[in-house]
Amino acid sequence: MAYQVCIDIGGTFTDCLVSDSGGNISIFKSPTTPGEFEKGFINVLHVAAGGYGLSPADFMRQIDLIVHGSTVSTNALVERKTVKAGLLLTEGHQDILVLREGPRKGAFQWKLDYPEPYVPRHLTRTVGGRIDARGRELTPLSVDDVTSAAADFRELGVEAVAVGLLWSVVNPDHELMVRSILEKELPGIPITLSHEINPMPREYKRIIAAAIDASINPIVRNYIEKLKLALDEAGFAGELLLANCVGGMMPLADMIRKPIYSVMSGPTLAPMAALALSDEPDIIVGDMGGTTFDVSALRDHQIIITPDSMIHDDSLGIPKVDVRSVGAGGGSIAFVDQGGLLQVGPRSAGARPGPACYAKGGTEPTVTDANVVLGIVDPDYFLGGKMKLDRTLAEQAVGKVAERLGVSLQEAAYAIYTTSNHNMVAAIEEITVREGINPRDSFFVCGGGATAIHIAEMADILGLKRYMIPRFMAGLSAFGGLISDIRKEESAVLLTSDASFNVEGVNDVLKKLVEAGDSFLAEAGVEPANRQFEFAFLGRYEYQSFEIEVPFEPKEAALSAGDLPALVESFHRMHERIYSIRADNDVVEFTAWKLRAIGKRSGQDIWQKNTLGDQAGPVEPKAHRGIYQQETRRVEDLAVYEMAELGAGAQLAGPCLVEAETFTAYLKDQHHGEIDRYGNLVVTVA
C-alpha cells in the first residue's frame, strides 16, 4: 500500500490526513508540541501508523509523499522572535520602513502611536549609488559604503541582511553587486535582495518583504533541516513539499530560498479544500481551531489574493491568499473585564496547558469548556473517545464567569459560546461585506475541529442559506494540502496604460514570466502536460494610490492590441465589484504583471473515487443528550447521530447533534442536513 500524507500544525492539535492508493482518507490528531514542532510532526505520524496497524518504520517506508503546512515562520513573527537582521538602503532613503506608505486609518482611530520600523535605525545602513526609474545608472555603486556597512553588521552581530535599493526591479545590477561583496565580507550570513523576493514598484512593500524574509531565513532553514533529519532517521524516503502562502506547495529548496512564502501558509490550505469540495461561485471558509478562527472567501470560484496582509504594524509585502484571523478558537479564554463585560479571546490556553477540561493544568474558562458545560461536547467521546475530558473541571472554570456575571452556570457557558460566535461573525463580515461579497448569497464551508459547533448560530446571524460540514472538517487545511497543486507566483513591473498600451513590452514581460514559471515547475519534477499558468495584472485608475489585481487569459501567453478593450473592461468590472463604482471614461494604468505557475500532482483527485453508498433505511440516532437551549433556558434532550453510520442521501432535521471521531456538529431548529456522495453534510436553513 502506498500512502500520501499531509500534516498541518495548529495551535492546539497537529492534524494528519492520510490517503491510500484506493482513495480512502483517514484523519489523525496529536497534541502540538510548541518549540519542538518537528517532534509533534513525528508523533502524529506514529499515531497514523498505529491507526493502520503498522509499525512507525513500516508506515514511513510506504509513504510516497508528505506535504506540510508550517507555522514556524508565522509564530516567529507574531511572537517577535526573529533573528537580528540588518538593512541596506539607498543613500538618502534610510527611512523607508519608518515612513511606510501613509496607511489608511480607521475613521475613529484619532490617536495612534507611530509604530517602530521593522528593522530599527541602528541596524540600518545606506550606500551611495543610484539607478533611475528607467534603469539607467545615474551614480555608480559605492563599494566602500558596502564594505563599511558589512563591517558594522559584523560588529553588531547581525544574523541576516536585507538589501533594498531604489528601482532594482528595473535594473538589479547594484543589488547583485552588493550581494557579491557581502558574501565575501560576511560569509555564511544569508542575504535577501528585494528585487528577487518581491519584484514590484512600491519601495515599502518590496523592502519590507526583503526585511521580513531575512529576519526569518535562519529560523525556517533550521526548522526544515531539523525536520528533514527527523524524517531521514525515521526511514522516510519519499518526497517532502511545503505549503506556501499563495495556496500551493513548494519544494524544500525553493522554500529555503524564499522563506517569506511560508508565512501564514497553513491557513491558505483551507480555501483550496473548499475550492475542490464545492462548485458554488461565492464561498466563505471558516476554520476554527484551538487558538484562532481563520476566515477566507472565494469570489467567482476563485481564490482571492491580497497584497495587503499585515504582521503587527507592518505589511507582509508579498501577495498571499486572503485569510483573516481572530483570536476565537476553542482554547480562547473568557474573562469579565473591569467594566463587567464578558470578553472571549484573543488570549488562548493553547496546547499547553489547554482548556481546563483537558486536565493538564489549565484553570481558566475557555470556549471548549463552555461547550462541555452546555452538553454539546461529550467528554467521553472527544477525538472518538481517545481523549477523555473532565466535565467537573470545565464547570469549575466556567463557574468563575458565572459568579462574576451573577448568572447560572449554563447561562454563563452560553454567554461565552455566543460571544465567541459574534467575534467570528465580525471577522466574516470584514472579508465579505467590506470586500463586495454578500454573505447571504454565499455558501459556507466549515473547517477546524470546532466550527460545526458554532456555525448554526452564526448562520442565523449572517442570514446564510446553506453551509457544508465536510467529512474531514477537523483537518480541512490538511485536506487542502493533500489535494493542492505545486504553485509559485512570479511578477514583473511594466507601467503602461490604455491611452498608449505597450503591447510589445507587455508580451516581453509575459514571455519572461512564463519562462521563469516553467523553469520552476521543471525543477519541481512536474511533467509538461501537467503545467498550467494563470495570469493577472495590477491596475488602477490614473491618479489612484492603490492597485487591484485582475485576472486575464491571454492566448498562448501573448496579447494583441485587440485584447486591450477586454483588459480594460475586466478592470472596470473588478473595481465595481470591490468598490461599487466604475469610471469608464478614466484612464486605466497597468503597473505590474503576474503569473502563477501551477503543477498538477498525481493522486490529487483520488479522493473523489471513494464515494458513499446510499442510506439504507431510516436514519436512527445513536443516543440522546441533554443540551442547554437558550431560547427556553432549560436543558432539552436532543438526538445524537453518528456521522460514520450515515449513507449518501441521509437527511437530518435540527435541533440535533452529529458526532464524528474528530468533531461535533450542532444543528439548530430549521436547519436541515443531507449527506452528499462524498460524506459531507450539506445544511439548508429554512
Image (cartoon, helix red, strand yellow):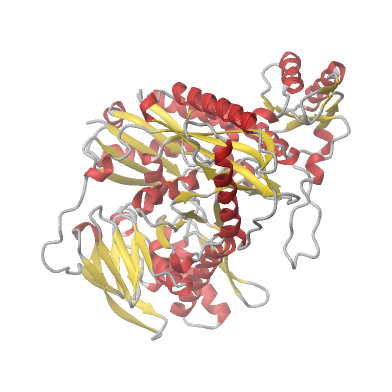
Residue projecting furthest to the front: 562
* Left or right, residue 364 beside residue 2: right
Residue 530 position in % (x across, y down):
37, 30
Count numbered badges in the picture. 0
Residue 362 position in % (x across, y down):
50, 59
* Left or right, residue 295 beside residue 161: left
Residue projecting furthest to the bottom: 632
Residue 274 position in % (x across, y down):
40, 51
Asked if one can make out residue 14 in the rendered structure from this viewpoint, the answer is no
* Left or right, residue 299 beside residue 509: left
State the residue in front, 222 or 453: 453
Image quarter of the C terminus: bottom left
State the residue in front, 88 or 544: 544
**Residue located at (13% from left, 69% from top):** 618
Residue projecting furthest to the left: 617
Image quarter of the N terminus: top left
Q: Quadrant of residue 180?
A: top right
Q: Quadrant of residue 51?
A: top left
State the residue in front, 589 or 174: 589
**Residue located at (19% from left, 52% from top):** 612
Residue 192 position in % (x across, y down):
68, 27
Q: Is residue 302 above or below residue 84?
A: below
Asked if one can make out residue 491 in the rendered structure from this viewpoint, the answer is yes
State the residue in front, 61 or 448: 448
Q: Quadrant of residue 377?
A: bottom left
**Residue located at (78% from left, 31% from top):** 133
